Amino acid sequence: ICGRCVTHCIQLHLLLYSVPSAFGLHGIDRLHELKADGGPKAWPASAHMPRIERRHLVAYTELAVENVKLNSVTRGLQHQKTGLSVARISSICFWCFCCFMFVGWFVSSRQQSVQDDEVVSSTGFQVMLLKVKPSITVNKASQIAAPAFVALVVLAVVVAAQVDAAEREAMVETHLGLTLNELDLMAPNLHHNWERPYPAIAIHKDGSVQTTRFGLDLMRANGNWSYLCKLDSDGDGLSNGEELGDPCCKWVPGVVATYRAWNLSEPSEETDSELPQYEEMDDSHLTALKQDLSPPSCGLPLDSEVRSRQLEKQYYMHHKEDEGSPDSLRWFKYPCAAVVSGLIGFWIAKKGLLRDLFGVGPVDQTAVMDLTALQRLSIYIAAYFWTDLVAGLVHLTFDFCPKDYPFIGHVAEGFQFHHRHPSAWTVVPLPVMITHSLPLLGILSVGLLLVPPKRCFRAFWTLTFALCVMTVLTHRWVHVKPETNFAWFTLLQRLGVLMSHEHHMMHHDSLMIQFSNLSGVTDGALNFLTVHCFPAWKYQHWLTVLLLYFAVTILVGADRGDEQPDLPPKSQGNYEYEEHGSANATQNW
């Protein structure tokens, strides 16, 4: 009864908040109200917003403003500290609904009556009467419920991310009258900003939106970047062009690239100017900072050597404040380490994992024969390429994911801060650095506990775990000068097994390509997708691809228990066959 009541409450919550928010039903209701009141009033005349008047209907603009006010009321569920939106709260409720469904399925399965089933061996050697125990029925139920639960959780996260991203983009479009694609044509590198992904507006935790000083100047410029570039919107002594990577104001969308995409700062925050080696900003420090951000002369052709030295200086620069970086997910890493260790230990002790990987170690009693060398080689190659693509998808997703998301926002904050202080990875203690992979591996281990993998996939997942840790280490060591690295690491770089310094420096140079942190063999495919499918800053789509990539691999490799291994002839091996009716028949089988 309690379960049904909670289920109805969750369904009512989804109906009242998620569906109207996703399909804009609040706006339809508000439109009827405006019609009942005689229609919206005319938009007030404004000298600095002529472009919006030409492109948008008056009724739509005022309706959109009213929608923002109404949405701020519906965000009463929003929490001040975590910044949960309606879509994300609905997704959490959906998770709870999935948990209730799974528990209900599991409990009901244990209550089913079980009868003796006649099992006929597939080899034709014998016929046994096997008494089916209740645990076998529960296992069959879990084989259906567990994959369904994993699929529903992935679906809930995907829907929540898509709805939330649509709300954020709609909020920007509503407040400025411009889409994100249009903003990208008015100013460069807006998606790479550390302080906020939309420098033209400030989205507060209470749901309110405010136009920043840079946003006001952007609307006045009306698409004229040469004018906007030379302004100093926040009054910090740096022009908007110097803060956004185009100090010479030569950027033309799709034609002329900016001078740099690294060492950017917030053009609407006076205290956000990057101070690489200075404690305070004065005239001398400001002059030195401008030299690090700009070419020697804007009137001369680009000097690639000077630019490369500036990039290398920022790439290897150490920041004193990075030595005390807090580990915000430490509380979550301990249980993740326990789950990962328990899973791998169980596979080693009971499932013959070491024997499947290296040909030595405990034997799996259910396995008839060892894997061949060709099978092991195939597993190694598949795990290597799979992990390289995962590293690129994870990097691509969290480079643009909002930092205020629950849990994954902490991960995204670390990825995005790395672009601001690239060498922060090198000053963090090595044990702490290794644990950065534990949240991902812990969540993956829970999925593998719910959906146990086949024999070959157990070896595959173990290799991916090890390669994920190697990915973290590789990312750390490519930010250390090559002459100080280990000899074996340098050798693997030269062989192309691990990522080189030059390869990763290309990512920090553009922030739009070369996302993989293991070797980069799959970067060609990711670079193609970011150009021809959807841009890199569309984090909601890349998060969807990442989750589906994990979920499909887990479900494809699931051990369904319906495939029996082929037994060798009686003359081979140490297998014994009992006659029909023997008490040890099941055990020997």
Image (cartoon, rainbow, N blue to C red):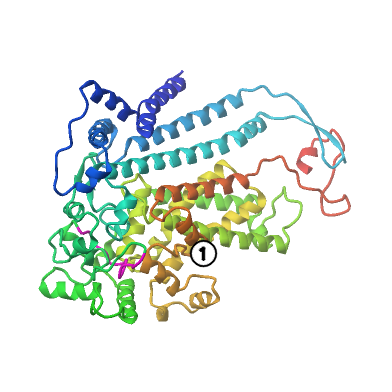
Say left or right for 295 vs 130: left
Q: Which residue is mark 1?
A: 524
Mark 1 lies on a secondary structure that is helix
Asked whether the viewer can see residue 361, the reply is no
Residue 423 locus on image (x, y percent): 33, 69
Say left or right for 384 vs 171: right
Occupied quadrant, residue 37: top left
Query: In the rendered structure, which segment of residues is drawn in magenta?
Result: 255-267
Residue 550 locus on image (x, y percent): 53, 49
Please tell me which residue lies in front, 26 or 129.
26
Name the kind of residue labelled 1 in the image: Gly
Count of numbered circles in the view: 1
From what the image shows, is residue 463 above or below residue 107?
below
Mark 1 crowdedness (10 Å alpha carbons): few <14, some 14-19, many ≥20: few
Please tell me which residue lies in front, 270 or 475.
270
Occupied quadrant, residue 473: bottom left
Say left or right for 423 vs 296: right
Asked whether the viewer can see residue 79, the reply is yes
Q: Residue at x 23, y 45 (%)?
A: 52
Q: Is residue 196 magenta?
A: no
Residue 459 locus on image (x, y percent): 62, 56
Q: Residue at x 16, y 49 (%)?
A: 48
Occupied quadrant, residue 362: bottom right
Say left or right for 263 vs 104: left
Please tell me which residue lies in front, 284 or 535.
535
Q: Residue at x 24, y 44 (%)?
A: 54
